[in-house]
């Protein structure tokens, strides 16, 4: 992670407007019970804000940017190791100060379960 980029103030403004943390339950035939859990961190913005997402991606050094329909772009990280080693430490160091903080704490707990107990595959 780079420091001194001034990305944190962008988070303060933009991240409070969008869903950040998600756990998707996905049907997968190769799993024991046929289901999997996919953790994710996502920031969705208007296409005009693509340079912001590119700076965020560069800051974290992980994740991808998706250019979608309807003038939408998103930055996402769904690799559990990247989430654990990069995204989680960032939000521990720079805590969210809105109701998103509660979402973050639940997401972090779920990610701990996935990492420690191998419960990603159901």
Image (tube, rainbow, N blue to C red):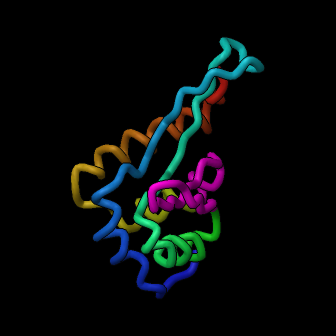
Examine the rendered structure and indicate whether residue 37 appears above or below residue 64. Answer: above
Q: Is residue 108 left or right of residue 19?
A: right
- Which residues lie in the magenta part? 63-85
* Rendering coords of residue 46 (x, y %): 41, 65
Q: Of 73 and 77, which appears nearest the observer?
A: 73
- Horizontal and vertical percent for residue 45? 41, 63
Residue at 63% x, 21% y is: 27
Residue 86 or residue 63, whichever sits in front: 63
Toward the right, the furthest residue is 30
- The residue drawn where x is 54% and y is 55% is 68
As drawn, which residue projects farthest toward the left? 98
Q: Quadrant of the C terminus?
A: top right
Tell me if 94 is positioned left or right of 36 in this view. Answer: left
* Relative height, residue 40 to residue 70 (above, below): above
Task: Kindly identify the residue that appears in the image at 47 percent across and 87 percent down.
Answer: 4
- Decide which of 42, 9 is in the foreground and name it: 42
In the rendered image of this protein, does residue 14 appear above or below residue 109?
below
What percent of the width, then of the height, locates residue 99?
Answer: 23, 49
């Amino acid at each position: 992670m780079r420091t001194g980029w001034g990305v944190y103030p962008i988070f303060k403004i933009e991240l409070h407007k969008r869903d950040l943390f998600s756990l998707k339950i996905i049907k997968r035939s190769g799993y024991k019970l046929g289901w999997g859990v996919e953790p994710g961190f996502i920031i969705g913005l208007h296409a005009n804000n693509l340079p912001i997402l590119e700076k965020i991606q560069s800051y974290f050094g992980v994740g991808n940017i998706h250019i979608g329909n309807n003038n939408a772009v998103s930055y996402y990280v769904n690799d559990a190791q990247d989430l654990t080693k990069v995204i989680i430490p960032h939000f521990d160091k720079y805590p969210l100060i809105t109701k998103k903080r509660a979402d973050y704490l639940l997401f972090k707990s779920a990610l701990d379960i996935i990492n420690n107990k191998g419960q990603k595959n159901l």
